Image: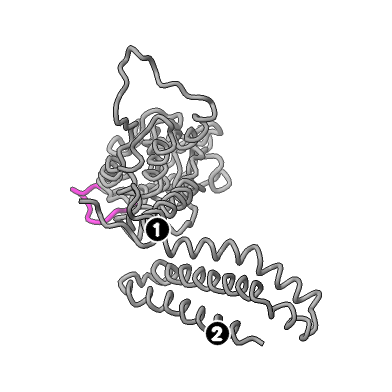
């Protein structure tokens, strides 16, 4: 038998226990195994009742985010052998900030509701007919927003954000980065509609630039930078609306 | 109806302006005053000019509002006192305003 490593997993089975409890499992230790491989080993061989989300196992779907040794990470992109000197134990918990439904599965409804509020799609006042062809972009125009388009909605940034923990109304890092993904897209004409949501206190202004969102982002989106950039935009708009109240906002 | 817009942009502009100016000029001032301190009459001669006074006033005012804004959020989030929203905002921005007036008075009557 190969070497083994201990995974301490937070379990919550509402029909069995009122509070989450810890359960330890021994899984084989392979250099090439990710944390998710360890969880799948448990599910397949030790306890089929263990609940967690995953799909693509290659850092694209954004569903396997968990707290591993206290850090929000994608479990499909975190080597077991790199945690705690490779000897474990490795502690696995659901992402903080989301009410736990079962074991490692959180309720992400709050994030989805907030995401819809900023209308994360290209808004046009008038769509040009198909016969006129596609909307062409230069590489420079693409570069304006490409970074923000890499977001996979994994919600690690929400788990890392101390403001989201304190102020549940805060619309949060990924949603603001995604709003900027469309605001900065030259094909989009919806920045004013999004501005009404973003410019409130629970929008960008709750952020105090802690920067943890960008530190944990597995796709290097830099939501903290997106928020600071939008603060500059919103401040310019605010001064315009105060100093030139007769002009169009 | 449009949702109410936050007044935060004004204070954030003061905060970020203050942070920028303080980061740029305060180390330079400290460096000069520490390593090549002018004599008092020299200093008076340099400061006693309305443009210098205006620049100092702007630097002091924005630095104070930078402090006020930062300290306000330190109290809200760090000490988790956000239920005292109005009181804290009044103390922080009120303090920055009062000290700005004091700085203005001192500069106006200088030397």
- Residue under pointer 1: A243
Does the stretch in magenta take in A14? Answer: yes
* Residues at discs 2 and 1 both on one chain: no
Give residue B102's mark.
none
With respect to residue B97, does A244 lie above or below?
Answer: above
- Residue under pointer 2: B105
Q: State left or right for residue B20 relative to residue B47.
A: left
With respect to residue A33, does A83 lie above or below?
Answer: below
* Residue A109, image quadrant: top left
Q: Residue furthest left?
A: A15
Q: Name the dominant secondary structure of the magenta segment.
A: loop
- The quarter of the image holding the C terminus of chain B is bottom right
Using the numbered discs, state the Cα–Cα distance from disc 2 to disc 1 in whole angstroms: 28 Å
With respect to residue A105, does B47 lie above or below?
Answer: below
How packed mark 1 is, by other alpha carbons closer than 10 Å (few <14, some 14-19, many 20 or more), is: few
Q: Secondary structure at mark 2?
A: helix
Question: Residue A9 at what x, y percent from top left?
Answer: 38, 47
How packed mark 2 is, by other alpha carbons closer than 10 Å (few <14, some 14-19, many 20 or more), is: few
* Disc 2 chain ID: B
Query: Does residue A102 appear anywhere in the picture?
Result: no
Question: Residue A201 at what x, y percent from top left?
Answer: 33, 58
Q: Secondary structure at mark 1?
A: helix
Q: Which residues are magenta?
A: A13-22
Does the stretch in magenta take in A3? Answer: no
Q: Which residue is at 76% across, 76% downward? A: B34
């Amino acid at each position: 038998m190969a070497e083994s490593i201990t995974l301490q997993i937070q379990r919550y089975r509402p029909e069995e226990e009122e509070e989450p409890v810890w359960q330890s499992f021994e899984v084989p230790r392979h250099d090439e195994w990710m944390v998710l491989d360890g969880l799948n080993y448990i599910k397949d061989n030790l306890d089929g009742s263990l609940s967690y989300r995953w799909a693509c196992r290659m850092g694209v779907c954004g569903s396997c985010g968990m707290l591993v040794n206290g850090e929000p990470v994608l479990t499909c992109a975190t080597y077991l052998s790199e945690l705690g000197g490779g000897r474990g134990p490795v502690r696995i918990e659901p992402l903080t900030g989301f009410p736990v439904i079962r074991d490692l599965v959180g309720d992400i409804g709050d994030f989805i509701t907030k995401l819809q509020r900023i209308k994360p799609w290209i808004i046009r006042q008038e769509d040009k007919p198909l016969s006129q062809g596609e909307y062409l972009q230069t590489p420079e125009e693409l570069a304006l927003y490409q970074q923000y388009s890499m977001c996979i909605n994994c919600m690690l940034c929400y788990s890392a954000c101390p403001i989201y923990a304190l102020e549940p109304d805060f619309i949060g890092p990924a949603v603001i980065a995604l709003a900027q993904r469309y605001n900065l897209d030259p094909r989009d004409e919806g920045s004013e509609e999004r501005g009404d949501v973003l410019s409130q206190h629970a929008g960008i202004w709750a952020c105090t630039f802690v920067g943890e969102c960008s530190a944990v982002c597995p796709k290097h989106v830099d939501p903290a930078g997106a928020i600071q950039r939008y603060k500059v935009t919103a401040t310019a708009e605010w001064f315009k609306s105060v100093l030139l109240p007769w002009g169009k906002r | 109806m449009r949702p109410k817009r936050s007044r935060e942009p004004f204070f954030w502009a003061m905060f970020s302006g203050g942070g920028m100016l303080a980061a740029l000029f305060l180390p330079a001032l400290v460096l000069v005053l520490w390593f090549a301190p002018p004599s008092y009459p020299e200093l008076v001669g340099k400061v006693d000019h309305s443009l210098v006074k205006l620049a100092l006033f702007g630097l002091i005012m924005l630095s104070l509002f930078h402090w006020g804004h930062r300290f306000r959020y330190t109290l809200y989030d760090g000490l988790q006192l956000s239920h005292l929203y109005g009181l804290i905002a009044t103390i922080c921005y009120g303090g920055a305003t009062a000290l700005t007036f004091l700085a203005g008075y001192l500069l106006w009557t200088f030397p």
